[in-house]
Image: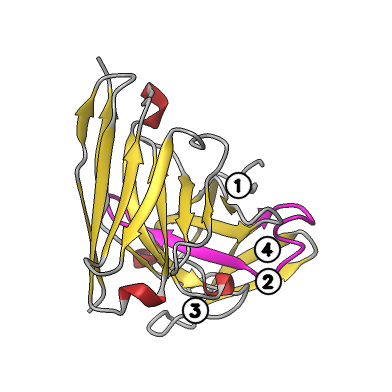
Amino acid sequence: EVQLVESGGGLVQPGGSLRLSCAASGFIFSDYSMNWVRQGPGKGLEWISYISSSSSTIHYPDSVRGRFTISRDDAKKSLSLQMNSLRAEDTAVYYCARQPQSLARGIDYWGQGILVTVSS
Amino acid sequence: QSALTQPPSASGSPGQSVTIFCTGTSSDVGGYNYVSWYQQQPGKAPKLMIYEVSKRPSGVSDRFSGSKSGNTASLTVSGLQAEDEADYYCSSYAVNKNLLFGGGTKLTVL
């Protein structure tokens, strides 16, 4: 069974940093690209980062580029998101999400999500 | 790049069909067959319902179908059931490899 379990969320002050982790199991982690997607309170989904299976390709939208860094450790079957210079608008539930090699396949599995609250 | 455009709400009675539209541009929806649809129940993670415009993952009911015409994709739910009440999001990859989501449509089963 595919499982993605996020951790590391919590309350952080504006301007602070936080590191999210995602533990993967039930599939060959190194065969898949991965994404982070977030959802603000009462809002829709927002994609915030992508990393290819080999870590050779990384993408971010403008809203987080330069502040967030995605990385992976295939040996530990783990995905991470380092978030710096956090703002109130970064408050959201953050999902770790699996991406098959073909972009056409969509995001086929999602973690349960972890809440990040940016507030003083 | 802007999010894809979806109506905020849609509704239908049990047994009826309802279609949700998702409008993008030639740089995303219209340019690639990379459209997916997700169902999100309250307090839950999204679930993939449709990928590659019209394909269903294993285990998804055939009451869900997808299509695309030009820059607009659509999700049709046939034979509406109470359990279909949820938020639905479309997504598409764009020319710059970014992943775009629609704003979401709340489907109500009357």
Percent x, y for residue B28? 71, 57
Residue A18, located in which quarter of the rendered image? top left
Label 2 SS:
loop
Earlier residue among tags 3 and 1: 1
Residue A31, located in which quarter of the rendered image? bottom left
Percent x, y for residue A6? 23, 53
Q: Are marks 2 and 3 in contact (CB under 8 Å)?
A: no
Residue B92, located in which quarter of the rendered image? bottom right
Q: Front-most of B82 and A30?
A: A30
Label 1 marks a residue whose chain is B
Q: Tag 1: residue type?
A: Pro
Q: Tag 3: residue type?
A: Arg
The part of the chain drawn in magenta is B22-45
Tag in front: 2 or 3: 2
The residue indicated by pointer 2 is: B33
The residue indicated by pointer 4 is: B73
Residue B25 in view: yes
The residue indicated by pointer 1 is: B7
Mark 2 surroundings within 10 Å by alpha-carbon count, few (fewer than 14), some (14 through 19), many (20 or more): many
Q: Tag 2: residue type?
A: Asn
Gap between marks 1 and 2 measured at Cα:
21 Å
Earlier residue among tags 1 and 4: 1
Q: Tag 4: residue type?
A: Ala
